[in-house]
Amino acid sequence: MMRRSTVVRVRPEDGTGLSVTLAVPGYRAFAFTATALRVPTATGELLIEAGHPSCVIPLDIGPFTVDAGARTWLAALHGGELRVADDEIDIVAATIEFADRIDVDRARAAQADAAHRLEHDRDDRAALLALRRANVRLAVAARVHPSPGARR
């Protein structure tokens, strides 16, 4: 039997921000407030701010940014779904890696492996997706720790 975790939604004190819940299957959901979110979609980056119209949007592979006042979080997001209703945002991410937790060496190895697989089969969809994920992870990590041997 699957256990449900209870998440208490956090409301912005001044009523002008977003109440966000981020869930990843297999992990406990995380609730927080934000002033803005930037999420990857199939048509490009989407900016979500207070007053955004209600919608349900599939998420793509790409950088995910949370602006929370003076603090900004950056992550590599690998698909999922975003729901917006009355400044309440629910994100179910297939996978997410926050920039400061990305293992650069592992991402480089995944990038090299995917590139090698594509050399042998240009139509290998799994390899194409793996390469996109690795490239996003490396780009996101570089924005947080730009040194060559960052976070090994």
Image (tube, grey):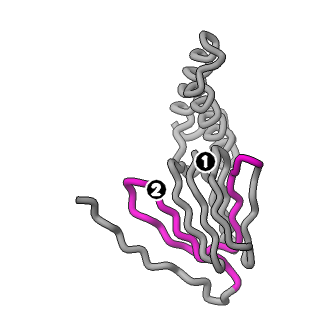
- The residue located at (69%, 67%) in the rendering is 67
- Label 2 residue SS: loop
Q: Quadrant of the N terminus?
A: bottom left
Specify the farthest residue to the top.
120
Vertical placement of residue 47 versus 130, above or below: below
Vertical placement of residue 60 versus 27, above or below: above
Residue labelled with disc 2: 24
Which residue is at the front of the view, 151 or 1? 1
Measured as percent of width and height from the top left, residue 80 is found at 56, 52
- The residue located at (56%, 62%) in the rendering is 91
Q: Amino acid at mark 1?
A: Ala
**Prevalent SS, magenta region:** strand
Measured as percent of width and height from the top left, residue 43 is found at 76, 48
Vertical placement of residue 80 versus 30, above or below: above
| Residue 61: mark | none
Which residue is at the front of the view, 51 or 63? 51
Residue labelled with disc 1: 76
Quarter assignment of residue 35: bottom right
- Label 1 residue SS: strand
Which residues make up the magenta segment? 16-43
